[in-house]
Image (cartoon, rainbow, N blue to C red):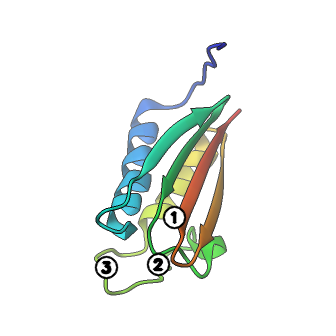
Amino acid sequence: VEQQNIEANAVDMRRIIQNLLSNAVKYNRDENLIKIYSQEKSLIIEDQGKGMLHPEKVFDRNYREDYSIQGNGLGLASVLSMLERNNININVKSKINRGTQITLNFY
């Protein structure tokens, strides 16, 4: 397997990964696994949680789908600005009661 090198700001990457993993843990069901893996120049995080009705809105400032879980709706909005700053594309796929898949594509 050929090694794929990427470059990104270390502080931003720490915050991006922490936020995405925190959300995966927060919205996952207790017994289910969270998968983290890479493919070529992509990092993928999958949970088997409650999923989202409107994954296209998750980067909107103050947007939250579930007010019963602690948060302020700012985390993914700040993640988006860090991704843009580091030329990283993000793709969000989600199905209600099936979970969410987040893919980071590094260029």
Front residue of 66/14: it is 66
Question: In the structure shown, which secondary structural element does the residue marked by tag 3 occupy?
Answer: loop
Instruction: Please tell me whether mark 1 or mark 3 is closer to you in this view.
Output: 3
Helix, strand or loop status at disc 1:
helix
Task: Name which residue type carries label 3.
Answer: Ile
Please tell me how crowded label 2 is: few (under 14), some (14-19), or many (20+) other residues with Cα within 10 Å.
some
> Can you give x and y, in whole percent of width and height, for residue 103 in the image?
61, 49
Q: Earlier in the sequence, mark 1 or mark 3?
A: 3
Which amino acid type is marked by label 2? Asn
Residue 2's spot in the image, x, y percent?
66, 13
User: Which of the marked residues, 3 or 2, is nearer the chain's N terminus?
Assistant: 2
Q: Are marks 1 and 3 in contact (CB under 8 Å)?
A: no
Q: CA distance from mark 1 to mark 3?
A: 17 Å
Mark 3–mark 2 Cα distance, whole angstroms, equals: 14 Å
* Circle 2 SS class: loop
Q: Residue at x 41, y 59 (%)?
A: 24
Within 10 angstroms of label 3, few (less than 14), some, or many (20 or more) residues? few
Residue corresponding to mark 2: 62
Provide the residue designation for mark 1.
Answer: 77
Looking at this view, name the residue that lies furthest to the bottom.
67
**Which one is in front in this view, the residue at disc 3 or the one at disc 2?**
3
Looking at the image, do the residues carrying marks 2 and 1 touch, with CB atoms under 8 Å apart? yes
The residue labelled by disc 3 is: 69
Q: Which mark is residue 22?
A: none
Residue 99, placed above or below residue 103: below
Q: Position of residue 19 (x, y in %)?
A: 39, 54
Q: Tag 1 or tag 2, which sits nearer the N-term? A: 2
> Which amino acid type is shown beneath numbered disc 1?
Ala
Instruction: Say whether residue 23 is left or right of residue 103.
Output: left
